[in-house]
Each structure stands twice: as structure tokens, then as C-alpha cells.
Amino acid sequence: MFSLERVVDLPLVWHGLIGAAIFLYVVLDGFDLGVGILFPFAPSETCRNRMMNSVAPFWDGNETWLVLGGGGLLAAFPLAYSVLMPALYLPVILMLLGLIFRGVAFEFRFKAEGRSRALWDRAFHIGSLTAAFMQGAILGAAVQGIRVEGRAFAGGPLDWLSAYSVMVGVALVCGYALLGATWVVMKTDGITRDWARKAARWAVCGVGLFLLAVTVWMPILSERARILWFSLPNALFLAPLPLGAGLLLLLVWRDLRSGREVRPFLASLGVFASAYLGLGITLWPWLVPYEITFRQAAASPESQSVLLVGTVFLLPLILGYMAYVHWVFRGKTSEEPAY
Amino acid sequence: MSQTLDPVLLARVQFAFTVAFHIVFPAFTIGLASWLAVLEWRWLRTGNVVFQETYRMWAKIFAVTFGMGVVSGVVLSFQFGTNWSVFSDKAGNVLGPLLGYEVLTAFFLEASFLGVMLFGWNRVGPRTHFAATLIVAAGTLISAFWILSANSWMHTPRGFRVGEDGLLYPENWLEIVFNPSFPYRFVHMVVAAYLTTAFVAAGIGAFYLWRGRHERHARVMLGMAMIMAVFVTPLQVLFGDLHGLNTLEHQPAKVSAMEGIWETRRGAPLKLVGWPDEKAEATLYAVEIPKLSSLILTHSWDGEVKGLKEWPREERPPVAWVFWGFRVMVGLGFLMVFTGAAGALLFLAGRLFNTRWFQYLCMAMTPSGFVAVLAGWVVTEVGRQPYMIQGVMRTSEAASPVPAGSIAFTLAAFVFVYVLVFGAGSYYILRLIGKGPGSTEPPYGAHGLKKPPLVLGGTGERGGLDV
């Protein structure tokens, strides 16, 4: 049967692809979740309308990366999918419920009036906040490790909940707020933009603090992480990542002061990329930390091959037409009624 | 509490709840997307603004429905793992790529071009906008292709082997994707979605005619819907029959449950109604038409029809669910055929748009498609029990190691959130229907006008006043 096993290192390629899909999800849905997190703090109804309009054409496509992350994990690493989902049962479902509230708010708030509009504004905010926090908590829980016996999760329903996972949850809320604020700076003008600039500076401070906290806490939590990041010569090779993240944050800060509108968003993406890469290195080669590696979790070579063939053609196509949609809706967002 | 609840049953109830809620939305949007493409095409060809206004009204309803479909669908892509992790682990090799292809070929396409379709009127030209509508419509069909292929494989699994480790491994992708029940299920479901939309459009059109509002738009809605009702409902009866015969070949126990037949016999009667009693192993109070069941299933008056007693009790599906689901679906199907026939006769008599009783009938039939689709899915999914993958894996062996308490908690949360959110969605859709076409002020920059200068917020964003 058809298989690319001899030609490419399938599990490695898929590990990279799923990793990329999850990264794209984090930064893409990150900015629209961030807009939701900042939503109630905007100075006026007009600002909120513009913020909503700036993400309305994109949120659906952004969220599809999450479905690809989930569906792709099932396809390429079914064992990891079937251990992680029960292990992270409650945070995953709470995240999904949060995403429901914020997703429908896009449609509902423009059709609602008066008090019910305020209700959907709140749903948009709380939903975004819940989804962001739960995603962070899921990440924190994964870093702490998952208990496995045989081919199944062997822990309890609240294993995921700890001081560390709560902190990562709050950290991600901060990170998404940074993406959201810099996005709004890029896509709006006037009062909305000026307010977003202030919000972005708060977020920069928050992200800086939390990156520091994670860097200090992780080595205390995990012997492996300490050896990986703080022993020579590793430390020298890996130093560019935290340093780069720090410098990019400073760049965001400076650009916000000097009135730049696009680069803060791009630099924030860079901060996320550095943090994500650092995380990937820490967790390597585990898919279910610290029990199942990506090689152990891999689907059969035939399954990984058949999906890879299509992905090679479809992924560039998808990125292409998503870029086209961003081009169609380029420039600043007006407050026009949605449609 | 947890000890007394059966986690497998809870996982089933939860999945049934979320998937049943979800299917309502695609059942509507698949047909609606295609209909919108037809409306926009008619408008571009004729320049008749009625088509455009009708398009705009239904595009808003489409947006709300599609949004609800997206958020309820994202849930499902995780529930395979949260509820059925053993199934995901064992069948992931086979079903994973199918679901992966659904995301890659359909979801991104729909999600990206939906933005252009809804918000792009004044940002792209009319041809590009029409292309976006077409792409969204195609995306809904591609999505149906993959998910129904995966679902059909669970009914008629082919092209795989069971490894020594108990996992399933793909052997032949063509056999997996085009498994025996897939072509029938795909056609039956897509046509069902088209009819669901048609009967909604007919009902709303009839409502406007009855109230004497938006008459030109209402004629488009009711007229186009009747074309579907007249020509497609009879075809659906045929497709349904073929699907049933396919089920008889591959899942005979399901068909016996549909028919409520317990004893194997020749010349079996058709039970119109009755109460299947699993303890007594009989269908009580049955009203029967002699020999008709044999005729339908074997196309011969004296053909042999297998009864449920052919299978041990633990191999039988829950009979009453399947039996009644089937009757609801078929009953509504025949009502649809009747509506179509009546519509055709009224049209020939020149009275399609002004016959009162027909308007009432169409209004009453508005939700018929949704109910029929749900009933049909109950028949096919409950009819597959006790198996998750027919003959390969039992549902009781497929569940996740999640305690009953967690499932009960999230089930309650799902019920609360879904009723609230989708109740509100239905309310907003009803309001959009109440407003009707053309009543909302058209956004600036008519269709065809390319990229007008950006219009900023009316209230003094530029002047720096209080905004």
C-alpha cells in the first residue's frame, strides 16, 4: 500500500506540521481572542463596533486552525489525541463553551439592541477570556506532565489544575491581549487606536513579567528543563530565544511610543514565536509529556502518508487564499454596519 | 452520585445532544448556500433587484446559522477524543485522514470565503463576490462528502485490517472512502439538506404572501422552493428506498428494527404503527398492510424478511427508537411529496401564490426538513447499536476513561449553553424573517462599485468628540 515511509521521516514532518498549525492558531485566534479580552475596556460603543468589525471577517478562518489542530492530531497522532482529550477533559470543554459564546456574539450583537446587546458584549468578553485562560491552563498542565497507563490517561479529572497551570492561563490572557491591542492599533485609527496603544503598553508589561515568571518557575518545576536551559553549552545555544523575546518586547514598547502602527503587531507575533519555540524545545520529543513521544504516538505510515500528499498541496493554497482575504479587507476598519 | 451513573450512557447522551444540535445547522446551510448561489446568479443574469434583496435577507440568516454551525462543530472535533478516546485510538489510523481532509478541503474554504461573501459587497466586484458565494456552497458539499464518508465507514467498514495490537490499519483508501453505504448516505443527506432549505423558504414565502408583505420576494421564495418540492421530493423517496435496500444488505438488524419485525417470514406485512416491546419480543397494537414489507424490501410479494429474533438480544439495536424514527421521517417525506404535488397542481391552475390553505400548509411544513433529518439520523445511528463500528467495535468498548461526574457536569453545561445560545440565535433569525427583505437600509457602496473611500464612524471620530 502507498506509503512515503522510506522517503520522508513521517512522524517528524507531522510533528512539525501540527506544531505549525497550533502556532498559527495561537497567533491568529490569539488576536481576535485578545480583542474580546480588551473589549469592555474600550472607551466607547463606536470603538467596540470598530474592534468587532476589524476581526469579524477573520475569526471563523482563524478558529479553523484549532479544528485542524484537533483533527490533525487525531489523524497524525491518534494515541496522543486519545490520551490528551480525556486528560484535559474539563479545560477543553470549558474552552469550547467559551468559544461558543464569543463566536455567536459576532452575529448576535449586531442584531441585538439595548440591553441584550450589552449581554452579547459580555458574552464576547467572558467567552474570549475563558477560552484564552483554558488554553493557557491546558498548556500549563501539559508542561507539568500527564499520567498515563498503557494507552490511556490514568489521572484524575482535576489533575490539570495547579498554581502553575493557572499562572500560564493568566499569562496567555496577557499575551492574547497584547496581540489584540497591537492588532487594533494596526486596523483602526482615531480614539480607538490611541486607546489600544495604551492598552498594548500594559500588555507589554504583563507579558514581560509572565515570561520572566515562566522562565524562573519552569526550572524549579522540572529537573529536565533546568538541565536543558541552564547548563553549558546548551544555555549559549538557547540564549537567543529569551533574549530575542525580550528585545522584541522592547521594540513593541518603543514603536508604540513612536507612533508606528504595523510593526508592534508583527513584533508581538515575534514574541509569541520565540516563546513557542522555547516551549517546543522544552517539550521535545514528547507529545504527551513525559510519557509518549511523537514517534510512539504516530499513526500508521499509510495514514500519515495519505494525508501528507494532500497537505503538501492544500496548505499553501489555504495560506494563499487566507492572505487574499486579508488583502481584501486590508487597511483601517470603518464603523460601517456589518452587512 | 458518580457511582450510580453509567459513564458510557452519559457520554452517549452528551454526544447525541451535541451532534443532534449541530446537524440542524448544516442541514440548513448546505441547501441555503446553494440556493444563495442560484439567487445571486439569477440577479447577475437578469439584473432584477428582487433576487438581490432576497439574497441579502437570506445571507443574513445564513450568517447566523453558519456561525452557530461553526461553534457547535468545533465542539465535535474534540468530542471524538473527550467522549470516545478508545475509538479514536483504535480507528484513528482510518478515520483521522478523512477528518483531516475535511478540514483542509472544506472548513478553511468555507470560513475564508464566507468573510468575503458577507462583508465583501463593497470591497470586491460582482463576479468575485459571486465566486465567493459559489466557493462557500462548494465548501459545504465537500464537507458533507468527507464527514458522511467517515460516518458511513462506521456503518459499513471496509478496506482495513485489525492489527495484532488491536488497532485498525488502512489497507485500501478507495474502499475506505467509497465504502458500500457512502454513496447512498451522501446523496440521501445532501438532498435532505436541500429539501430542508426548500421547505423553510417555502414556509417563509407563504408567510409573507399570507400577510400580504414583500410579495415579489415571496414569490421567488415559494416558487423556487416548489421547484425543489415538485421535482426533488419524489427523487428523495427513491434515494431513500435505495439507501434502505443498501442497509438491508449490510445492516439487516437495523432494517428489521425499522420494520418492527421479530419473526423471520415470507410475505411480511408492513406495520404502519405499533409499539415495539423488546421484552415481549413483539410489536404490539400493530396496524398492518399485508405483504407490503416484503414487497418494499425484496421487491417480491413473497420475499423473506428477517426478524429481530435472528439475532441474540445483545446484538439488537433499541427497537422503538429506530421504529419510530423511521415512521416520523417517512411520514414527513410523504407530506413533502404531497405538498409538492399540490403546489404543482395549483401552479397549473394559476393559483400557487394566492391559495390560503396552501399557504397554511407551507407554513406548517417549515420545520419538516429539520425534524425529518433528525429522525433519519436517529434511525441510522441508533440502528447501528450496539456497535460503534458495525461488527468491529462496540460502543461500550469505545468510551473515554472519564468519570461519570465530569461527564454529567459538562452535559448539564452543554444543555444550558446550547439552549440559551441557540435559542437566542433562533430568536434573531425569526426577527430577521419578521423584518423581511429590502427593509433594511442598504449599506453604502452598491454591489459592483469597487472599493469606495472608507466611510468612518458618523459621530466625530475625526473631530475627536466623545465617541
Image (cartoon, helix red, strand yellow):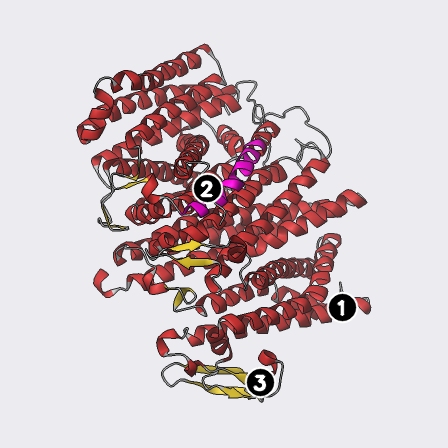
Q: Is residue A191 above or below residue B108?
A: above
- Numbered range of the magenta stretch: A300-320
Residue A68 badge: 2
**Is residue B225 visible in this depiction of the protein?**
yes
User: Would you call the spot at circle 3 few (<14 residues within 10 Å), some (14-19), or many (20 or more)?
Assistant: some
Distance between the Cα atoms at labels 3 and 1?
36 Å
Q: Nearer the viewer, residue A36 or B402?
A: B402
Q: Chain of mark 2?
A: A
Q: Chain of mark 1?
A: B
Distance between the Cα atoms at labels 3 and 2?
49 Å
User: Would you call the spot at circle 1 few (<14 residues within 10 Å), some (14-19), or many (20 or more)?
Assistant: some
The image position of residue A243, as x and y in percent, is 32, 16
Q: Is residue B105 above or below residue B423?
A: above
Q: Which residue position is annotated with label 1?
A: B344
Dots 3, 2 in contact, CB < 8 A:
no
Which image quarter: residue A334? top right
The amino acid at mark 2 is: Leu
